Amino acid sequence: MLVDTMGLVIETLVHSAGIQDRDGGRYLVSKAKTNGATFHKGYADGGYAGKFVDWAKNTHEIIIEIVKRSDQNKFVVLPKRWIIERTLAWISRYRRLAKDFERFGTTVRNWIFLAMTRLMVKRLAKEYG
């Protein structure tokens, strides 16, 4: 999932567990750029370290910063990494997304966009209502 600094979804990809994060990340970034997303810096966890960082820089001129845990024995909120975790918590409030009920990844992707659309509409209604 690709989110902005407010935690709103820019693009999402649901794939099988047999695909590595960095390979899915290439497809996700390419799809977001094709759909018109403009960003020059991103944050990712350790699963994206290595070739993905170089690929993003060379192909799309995006600087990817890897956010790693400094201490393995205790819980520490990591800057920037909590944004995606918060977004995942928001969408897991929707029963249909809390478990793996869907047969196809495209269906899950559509439900994620519907959940985020509802979330944004609720925020706008609260602000202007």
Image: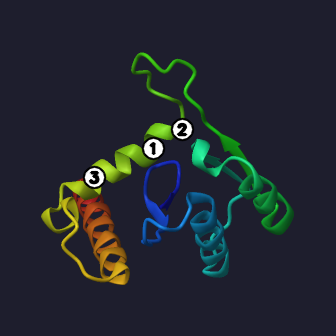
For the image shown, how many numbered marks are present on the structure?
A: 3
Q: Residue at x 30, y 82 (%)?
A: 107
Query: Is label 1 in a helix, a strand or a loop?
Result: helix
Q: Residue at x 39, y 44 (%)?
A: 85
Name the spot of residue 127 as percent of width and height, x first. Answer: 28, 54
Identity, as a three-letter code, of the amino acid under mark 2: Lys
Q: Nearer the viewer, residue 21 or 96?
A: 21
The residue furthest front is 18
The answer to whether residue 128 is above or below residue 45 is below
Circle nearer the N terminus (2, 3): 2
Q: CA distance from mark 1 to mark 3?
A: 11 Å
Name the spot of residue 100 as percent of width and height, x first. Answer: 22, 67
Identity, as a three-letter code, of the amino acid under mark 3: Trp
Quadrant location, the C terminus: bottom left
Q: Residues within 10 Å of mark 1 (few under 14, many from 20)?
A: some
> Which of the 4 image quarters holds residue 125?
bottom left
Q: Residue at x 60, y 63 (%)?
A: 25
Identity, as a three-letter code, of the amino acid under mark 1: Ile
The answer to whether residue 86 is above or below residue 31 is above
Task: Write down the residue under mark 3.
Answer: 90
Query: Is label 2 in a helix, a strand or a loop?
Result: loop
Q: Nearer the viewer, residue 49 or 5?
A: 49
Q: Residues within 10 Å of mark 3 (few under 14, many from 20)?
A: some
Left or right of 12 in this view: 93: left
Task: Write down the residue under mark 1.
Answer: 83
Circle nearer the N terminus (1, 3): 1
Task: Write down the residue under mark 2.
Answer: 80
Q: Are marks 2 and 1 in contact (CB under 8 Å)?
A: yes
Query: Is label 3 in a helix, a strand or a loop?
Result: helix
Q: Which mark is residue 61?
A: none
Left or right of 11 in this view: 34: right
